[in-house]
Image: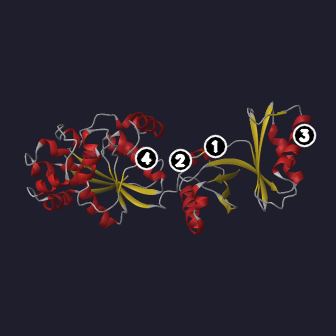
Amino acid sequence: MKVLVHYNEIGLKGRNRAYFENSLINNIRKKIKFNNLKKEEKRVIFDTNEDINILKDVFGISHFSIVEEVENKVDKILDKAESLMGDAKRLGLKTNRSDKKFPLTSIELNTKIGEIANNKGIKIDFSNPDKTVYIEITNKNAYIYSEKIKGLGGLPIGVSGKVLLLFSGGIDSALAAFLLMKRGCKVDFLHFHALRNNNEVMDSKIINILNILKKYQEEIKLYLVPYHNYQLSVMEKFDDKLDVVMFRNFILRFGQLIAKKKKYKGIGTGDNLGQVASQTLDNLNAAGYRVTLPILRPLLTFDKQEIIDLAKKIGTYEESIKIYKDCCSIISKKASTSVKIKSVEENLEKIDFDKIIEKSLEEMEIRKI
């Protein structure tokens, strides 16, 4: 069968469009086997015998369809359009004519198809059809189909570069990963854990969530870091009200060190403005002290119900809400809502973050999921 893939944003990329198109094609190739590939005027067309529903999980696709390909000649188009009408009672028509040399306008072609439909007892209904015939006329061919399958949209994974995500295993960080992927980021994950060893994480919900996200991104790296080095080093060194912000500063700086070594362009988080005490503007600013890489926060302006609804839609919600001993559950809950950078500077003088980072690096492991 012949498949036509449409994209939206890629078509706006000017001189970089070929790079974006090729990235999309490579990502499709990871999901499905195909042949006879061609690109025609902001479309990708190929032949395949596989289930195309898997294309619903490929970022960069606006919509896709199984199509009939004919010459861009009026009689050929009319014949094929008639064959797709089937047992429709109310028929919609949508014609796109990118070949302006085609002898009929879109309206004129729709009129001719409408006459055929009327002769078959089918009513043309543009507002409430029970079936729609789509016709796309290019300089070379015409593509005719009756079903349009919605894709994820966004940009192909990889075109925006690599991002290292601080991953707790909660609802927010999993969804943040998905949204960064949607904007073309290749996302890998940094997870600090309070379990006895790194192997225990591999049997936890952390891996279950990443396996769900692999539906959208084929290759994932997980950086596993034990929490105990930090915990033992800072015990009772900070005011309880500063604990959360100081830990956030530590993991952001640790993440930045890994990111710079491994050529990540930014650090992603699941931060949501005002959701909890640690996520006020003052505290987000203080937690980012000495972090020079971009901190990407795709959930910043979402409300909680929006986050829950979208997490359910992508399939991560049920795993994310399972009980797990994460680091934040150990840290004091008496967080100040307005930690100043000066307070972070003063408290950093009490400990050697660089030494804690060095010890943590020694116990860090990288796992491919």
Q: Earlier in the sequence, mark 2 or mark 4?
A: 2
Q: Amino acid at mark 4?
A: Leu
Identify residue type, mark 2.
Answer: Asp
Q: Callout 4: 10 Å neighbours few (<14), some, many (20+)? A: many
Q: Nearer the viewer, residue 168 or 287?
A: 287
Ranked by sequence position, the earlier of labels 3 and 4 is: 3
**What is the secondary structure assignment of the residue under circle 2?**
helix
Q: Is residue 88 visible?
A: no
Of callouts 3 and 2, which one flags the residue occurring earlier in the amino acid sequence? 2
The secondary structure type at the circle numbered 3 is: helix
Mark 3 or 2, closer to the camera: 3
Residue tagged 2: 57
Disc 1 target residue: 149
Q: Which residue is mark 4?
A: 213
First in sequence, mark 1 or 3: give its number: 3
User: In the image, 155: left or right of 276?
Assistant: right
Q: Which residue is mark 3?
A: 115
- Of labels 2 and 1, earlier in sequence is 2
Q: What x and y, as percent, mark residue 269?
A: 34, 50
Residue at 17 percent across and 41 percent down: it is: 331
Q: Residue at x 19, y 41 (%)?
A: 336
Location of residue 101 with respect to 150 vertically, above or below: below
